[in-house]
Image (cartoon, rainbow, N blue to C red):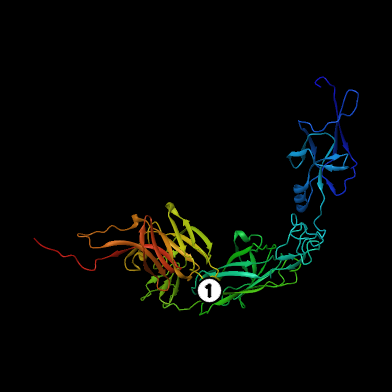
């Protein structure tokens, strides 16, 4: 009644009533109403709900325990008639990491209770909560402490779900791939060797990866500096052991590698000053794995078909090895004299290798043989270069990582460069594609930046010649820019090729094949 005097009593109970098979995640609270004569009032099946906020005990649960808790725990009350905890007439409308709100239509004792149906490590597989259960809660044996199947293992119920899982190794630890390529084949020149290694299993700290096949280098010493890619920082050291005689590089890992790791690094050696066939590279590692059952196994080795440090030596034709040309009249500024030619390294252009370009942008892409691949990079004035490699352009089992560098030839093209291929003028940027010499099963499409303002204006009365911008590729064996053709597409020239080298848009002067007829009055 509205004028009735009612007292509310709340208590916390330390002793749990008989409740076998239960896990408690909170203290037990009792809530009672007393009338004026201090008699307990029977409160049940009310139209309005009583909301009781109950604090939770420590939630220091394992992943598996948390999963069971979220699925099974809830607000329950003690049913004196049934002598058990029940959730009849109660719900949990609000649940946080620190408390739960019990909303019930009656009053008695309340707690956050979970029906205990099993546990990880009891040897009985419960599919709702476990991927495996091998009878223990120890990681490293295929079924981890949260009853999840570990990487490189498979677990089965050979004798049904009531018996422990049987786990076996399913993945053979190995190197799954390697990409190795060098930057040039110029005799006596600095050569950057780029490496990317793929692995299928973890490797422990201190594991030593051995790479062999770098035979013929002029690089002496017992160590060599590595330029480490960001993705491999802390994994691959900055210095490794080097043996010039055997062409062997030994890399001791500074931390354990995970299965998702790919090790990327590069190092610089000096090319031989003699004919060198080049060699194929082998990557190997013994006892390189992390834990049981791998600790006694070897990663084995992987063979990479490549030809690093391949050099076809041609002695300079001139007594002064910095001079070249038929009369030894030209100085090879930043290049290497090979026979009677001046051959430029990447980023250097011109007939005398005197035009040092500026690197504007660089990017890379790991090609997928089963899909089309596209890569774009942007340079000055928002100019962009891109390439598209169609599906099936590389063999299905081939690993190719493409690098695209955009070099600025501006502001003034080298005078020698303008005439070295018969009257052509650079009117764009140079795009260098690596690995050098890479060929494709299908033509790839290049979109090269094109600066219409750099195309000469025809002169003369009448105008007999035109300047046509087309794609060109640089034949380093001759130093000549060869015409690829192509079509103008806005600020680009689109063209096709089947190999990688250096590309640029050049405007070449074209003359008519027949002279126009002149008449006189």
Q: Residue furthest top?
A: 3
Position of residue 109 relative to residue 256, above or below, is: above
Taking the spot 44% from the left edge, 62% from the top edge, the residue there is 431
Query: Is 234 left, or right, of 483 in this rendering?
Result: right
Position of residue 142 relative to residue 73, above or below, is: below
- Seen from the viewer's position, the closer of residues 277 and 445 is 445
SS label for mark 1: loop
Local packing at callout 1 (Cα closer than 10 Å; few below 14, some 14-19, many 20+) is many
Taking the spot 79% from the left edge, 66% from the top edge, the residue there is 159
Query: Is 251 left, or right, of 405 in this rendering?
Result: right
Image coordinates for residue 487, horizontal then vertical, percent: 35, 61
- Seen from the viewer's position, the closer of residues 402 and 317 is 402
Q: Is residue 179 visible?
A: yes
Q: Is residue 426 visible?
A: no
The quadrant the C terminus occupies is bottom left
Query: Is 258 left, or right, of 122 in this rendering?
Result: left
The quadrant the N terminus occupies is top right
- Seen from the viewer's position, the closer of residues 343 and 24 is 24
> In which quadrant of the rendered view does residue 424 lie?
bottom left
How many numbered tags mark residues here? 1
Taking the spot 79% from the left edge, 50% from the top edge, the residue there is 61
Image coordinates for residue 230, horizontal then vertical, percent: 60, 59
- Residue under numbered circle 1: 271
> In which quadrant of the rendered view does residue 283 lie?
bottom right
Image coordinates for residue 310, horizontal then vertical, percent: 52, 76
- Seen from the viewer's position, the closer of residues 99 and 465 is 99
> In which quadrant of the rendered view does residue 300 lie?
bottom right
Image coordinates for residue 101, horizontal then vertical, percent: 76, 37
């Amino acid at each position: 009644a509205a004028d009735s005097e009612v007292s509310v009593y709340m208590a916390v109970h330390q002793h749990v009533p008989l409740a076998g098979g239960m896990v408690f995640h909170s203290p037990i609270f009792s809530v009672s109403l007393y009338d004026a004569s201090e008699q307990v009032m029977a409160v049940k099946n009310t139209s309005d709900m009583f909301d009781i906020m109950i604090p939770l005990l420590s939630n220091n649960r394992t992943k598996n325990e948390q999963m069971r808790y979220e699925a099974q725990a809830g607000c329950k009350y003690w049913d004196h008639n049934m002598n058990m905890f029940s959730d009849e007439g109660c719900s949990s409308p609000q649940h946080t990491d620190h408390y739960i709100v019990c909303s019930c239509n009656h009053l008695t004792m309340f707690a956050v209770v979970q029906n205990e149906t099993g546990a990880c490590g009891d040897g009985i597989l419960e599919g709702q909560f476990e991927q495996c259960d091998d009878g223990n809660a120890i990681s490293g044996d295929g079924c981890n402490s949260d009853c999840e199947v570990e990487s490189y293992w498979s677990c089965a119920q050979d004798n049904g779900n009531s018996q422990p899982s049987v786990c076996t190794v399913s993945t053979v630890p190995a190197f799954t791939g390697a990409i190795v390529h060098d930057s040039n084949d110029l005799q006596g020149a600095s050569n950057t060797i780029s490496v990317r290694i793929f692995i299928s299993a973890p490797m422990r700290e201190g594991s030593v990866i051995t790479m062999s096949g770098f035979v013929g280098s002029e690089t002496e010493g017992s160590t060599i500096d590595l330029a480490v890619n960001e993705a491999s920082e802390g994994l691959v050291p900055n210095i490794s052991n080097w043996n010039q005689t055997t062409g062997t590089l030994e890399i001791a890992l500074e931390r354990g590698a995970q299965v998702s790791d790919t090790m990327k690094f590069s190092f610089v050696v000096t090319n031989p000053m003699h004919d060198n066939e080049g060699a194929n590279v082998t990557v190997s590692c013994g006892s390189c794995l992390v834990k049981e059952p791998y600790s006694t196994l070897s990663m084995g080795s992987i063979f990479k078909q490549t030809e690093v440090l391949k050099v076809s030596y041609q002695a300079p034709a001139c007594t002064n090895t910095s001079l070249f040309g038929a009369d030894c009249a030209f100085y090879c500024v930043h290049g290497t004299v090979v026979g009677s030619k001046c051959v430029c390294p990447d980023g250097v252009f011109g007939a005398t290798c005197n035009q040092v370009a500026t690197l504007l942008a660089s990017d890379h892409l790991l090609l997928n043989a089963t899909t089309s691949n596209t890569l774009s990079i942007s340079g000055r004035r928002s100019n962009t270069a891109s390439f598209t490699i169609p599906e099936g352009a590389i063999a299905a089992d081939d690993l190719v990582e493409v690098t695209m560098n955009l070099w600025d030839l501006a502001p003034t093209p080298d005078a020698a460069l303008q005439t070295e291929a018969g009257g052509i003028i650079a009117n764009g940027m140079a795009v260098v594609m690596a690995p050098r010499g890479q060929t494709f099963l299908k033509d790839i499409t290049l979109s090269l930046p094109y600066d219409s303002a750099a195309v000469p204006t025809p002169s003369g009365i009448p105008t007999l010649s035109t300047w046509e911008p087309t794609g060109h590729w640089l034949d380093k064996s001759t130093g000549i820019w060869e015409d690829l053709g192509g079509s103008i597409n806005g600020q680009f020239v689109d063209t096709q090729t089947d190999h990688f080298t250096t590309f640029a848009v050049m405007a070449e002067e074209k003359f008519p094949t027949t002279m126009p007829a002149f008449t006189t009055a």
